[in-house]
Image: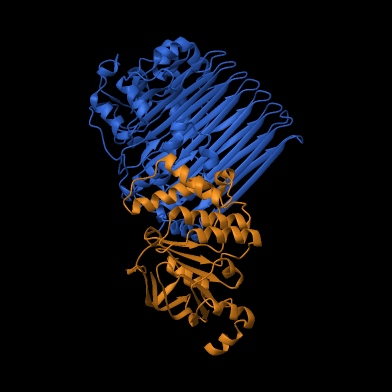
Chain colours: A orange, B blue
Amino acid sequence: MLEVKNLHVSVAGKKIIDGLSLKVADGEVAAIMGPNGSGKSTLSYVVAGRADYEVTEGSIRLDGVDLLDKTPAERAALGLFLVFQYPLEIPGVATMTFLKAAMNAQRKAREQAELSTPEFMKKVREAAAKLNIPQDMLKRPVNLGFSGGEKKRMEILQMALLEPKFAILDEMDSGLDIDALRICAEGVNALRSKERGLLVITHYQRLLDYIAPDTVHVMHKGRIVRSGGPELALELEKSGYADYAEEAA
Amino acid sequence: MAAVQETVDKVKTLDVDAYKYGFTTDIESEKAPKGLNEDIVRFISAKKNEPEWLTEWRLDAFRRWQTMAEPQWARVHYPPIDYQDLYYYSAPKTAEGPKSLDEVDPELLRTYEKLGIPLREQEILAGVQADPNARKVAVDAVFDSVSVATTFKAELAKAGVIFCPISEAVKTHPELVKKYLGSVVPVTDNYFATLNSAVFSDGSFVYVPPGVRCPMELSTYFRINERNTGQFERTLIIADKGSYVSYLEGCTAPQRDENQLHAAVVELVALDDAEIKYSTVQNWYPGDSEGKGGIYNFVTKRGDCRGARSKISWTQVETGSAITWKYPSCILRGDFSRGEFYSIAISNGYQQVDSGTKMLHLGANTSSRVISKGIAAGHSQNTYRGQISAHRKAVNARNFTNCDSLLIGNACGAHTVPYIEAKNSSAVFEHEATTSKISDDQLFYCMQRALSAEEATALIVNGFVRDVLQQLPMEFAVEAQKLIAISLEGSVG
């Protein structure tokens, strides 16, 4: 369970998140919707532990463990995964190499033995097949020259391999055509489970047609201004964010 | 990927100042008195029972050296070196050269062990019979100034390959030494090469006869061991017509507070259709985290593609030394000859690197390729200096140069100083250069995938240098990958 309490975050002196509280239970799929600049992506970065964000107040806990004093790697080892809106390119590092380094780093942090090469290859092949990722793509450098759809599929592949306790999907739909969106969403849905919580951050209802949320939260000016069930997303699709902007103001 | 994992483990076990090879072997040494004069030069020559011509050759060099001044053009700064305050000869005490490994001082063998000489070589040193089908490595180990263990001689002899200390070659193959010594790097070449010519201690000699493909990689491990001892390696490799040889050079040095001077000379000669591949992993003590101590490395390495269609390829991974002044070069004399230079130069702490290459196109249809990857971290300064030139007769000369610099942190510097000179209009020279920084976003991305800041940096840097690592023989590539991670340790976070 992810529990964010009264979170206040500034970047270079400017307040971006202003007293945000949020709970996502195990097995729950929560969606956060909101207009541009409402602080959605900042929330995902702060939970994952990116530098340059100053948390002035509040707490973030994953299964009761305080995340704020942990490094991004420690948070990842605890089972936190972020699907990046813009996955980074790493020239010269084969995707396969990267995947193995990540999986073994996680295993090491959990005091598990390293995967043998055959075990690793088997896991990757199976997971890649489900996401229509061809083998030769795994030999290419991480995300280098990948299309938007390829990058996102690679993110979901990593999520499948790292089996997170909790995953945040930051605008997963951006840059995806409808077919790519469907493949990625199916990949995510296959990873839904009773133990795993998901936080789906999106601007549009569209994504939620594919990944059905249990709860929907509307974010504006750095805080949650309304929460409800899936119907809230549909309502937003019709009326837009204007109402909430006024409410919050 | 196992290598990266090993890298990671190794990094974890190290402290910033805990230079791994900072130990001293206690072997009684025999040294010449401090300082340099004609008597010392004669002493060195006499110690080695050298013929008169070589003694005179050294003395000529010494006299020439006295008229020369230390070069000042490199982008490195260091206090003046007192050449009279150094020892120019020291040798581990053994009555005669050992006939087998049993006779080698066990202390020396323990040193190799501590150095982490790859298992294959350790087995060879220990006399273990290896799988005859496995690729073999012959080690000519130089401990301080005198070679103490030479292996695989018999098998090499069968192929007609001569691989021995140069001091031995002077006696056993004087005609070859006399013909080629100083023919690539003349006695008068530069201050440090001239000094080396006067006082060179020992080094490797390789001769590969016509048409022979050397049956194994030739490898030398050497380290500086004696306090205040200048180390003046001299290596000469000759690949006769149509032959091939791959030579590996790797070194580590014990930790010292005083700066140690190292001025080696390496000469390569490739005759018609011959190929020489020379790979170096250099890991000398770089100084402590405040820039104190460390090796001064002033090296002259040059290959002469003397014959038509000959090829010389330099690959280097430079991670150590306080100061590196080194430009492995190729003289492309033979028509259709080819020169290559692949380099990874990493600097951290207060290290200063001024390194690069020269490709001198003299013959027609000569080609060269330069791939240089400089990585600067900490407070270090990392300069690529390269010269590409085409002589009037070098019609259709081709060069491609790519030099990339990667910066880690805000206190280091990367510099690129290319000199490009074409004296005929048919030459085509290409030069590409980039400078980049490891971005915080890249690091964060890797860290979100459970990699620590150091693991992430090592991974990104290994990606950056991949093109060059691929040029190294397999065993060396693994070692180099580890070294890269170790030398960048403490540069992030």
Q: Measured from the top left, where is residue B484 in percent x and y?
A: 43, 44
Please name whichever residue, B288 or B220, is drawn nearer the observer in this view of the structure. Answer: B220
Q: Quadrant of the N terminus of chain B?
A: top left
Task: Estimate the x, y position of residue B192 in percent, counting from the top left.
Answer: 46, 33
Q: Nearer the viewer, residue B406 or A2?
A: A2
* A214 w.r.t. B369: above or below: below
Name the residue at 48% across, 31% down.
B473
Residue B320 seen anywhere in this rendered image of the structure: no
Quadrant hosting residue B257: top left
Query: Looking at the image, which is closer to me, A201 or B489?
Result: A201
Instruction: Please tell me whether residue B7 is drawn above or below residue B206 in the rendered image.
Output: below
- Residue B479 placement, left or right of A187: left
Q: Is residue B206 above or below residue A12?
A: above
Q: Nearer the viewer, residue B161 or B425?
A: B161
The C terminus of chain B, quarter of image: bottom left
Instruction: Decide if residue A185 is on the left or right side of residue B348.
Output: right
Number of marks in the image? 0
- Which residue ends up furthest to the right in the rendered image? B425
Can residue A76 be seen from the camera position used here? yes
Picture coordinates of residue B314, whole percent (x, y): 53, 32
- Spot occupied by residue A62 in the image (x, y as percentages of width and height): 37, 68
In screen coordinates, is B14 left or right of A187? left
